[in-house]
Image (spheres, grey):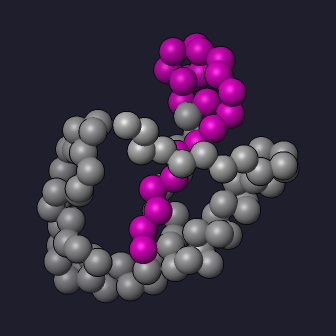
């Protein structure tokens, strides 16, 4: 079973990244984290791959700050396949 969704944009990579971020914002998401996978693999493994990145979107980003401060979550290590952030309050 495939849980991925693929959408191809007819745009240069950098333009496509901006369009994806704008689309997330239009739907109420903010980008909490962004991983440049190509650069990470190059830096750590000297491996050349096509450009791609991983976003960590968070719904209703403007409301996170106050709730995050009130809850005082502790940093936790999450396994690679984790689907839920343990120790982070629901927003």
- Classify residue 24 as left or right of residue 84: right
Residue found at x 47% / y 62%: 57
Locate residue 47 relative to residue 86 in the image: left or right.
Answer: right
Residue found at x 54% / y 24%: 41
Q: Is residue 80 visible?
A: yes
83 inside magenta stretch? no
Q: Is residue 14 visible?
A: no
Q: Is residue 45 left or right of residue 2?
A: right
The image shows residue 76 at horizontal and vertical percentages of: 18, 50
Q: Is residue 71 above or below residue 15?
A: below
Residue 87, horizontal then vertical, whole percent: 15, 61
Q: Residue furthest right?
A: 11
Work out whether 24 lies above or below 51.
below
Residue sitting farthest toward the front: 1
Depth order, front residue of 8/37: 8
**Residue 16: horizontal and vertical position, in percent?**
75, 53
Q: Residues in magenta? A: 38-59
- Measured as percent of width and height from the top left, residue 37 is found at 55, 34
How many labels sit on residues?
0
- The image quarter containing residue 3 is top left
12 versus 31 height, above or below: above
């Amino acid at each position: 079973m495939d849980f991925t969704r693929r959408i191809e944009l007819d745009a240069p990579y950098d333009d496509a990244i901006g369009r994806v971020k704008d689309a997330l914002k239009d739907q109420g998401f903010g980008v909490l984290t962004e991983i440049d996978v190509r650069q990470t693999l190059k830096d750590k493994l000297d491996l050349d791959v096509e450009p791609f990145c991983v976003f960590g979107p968070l719904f209703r980003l403007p409301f996170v700050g106050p709730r995050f401060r009130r809850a005082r979550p502790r940093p936790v290590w999450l396994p690679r396949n984790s689907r839920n952030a343990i120790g982070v309050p629901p927003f």
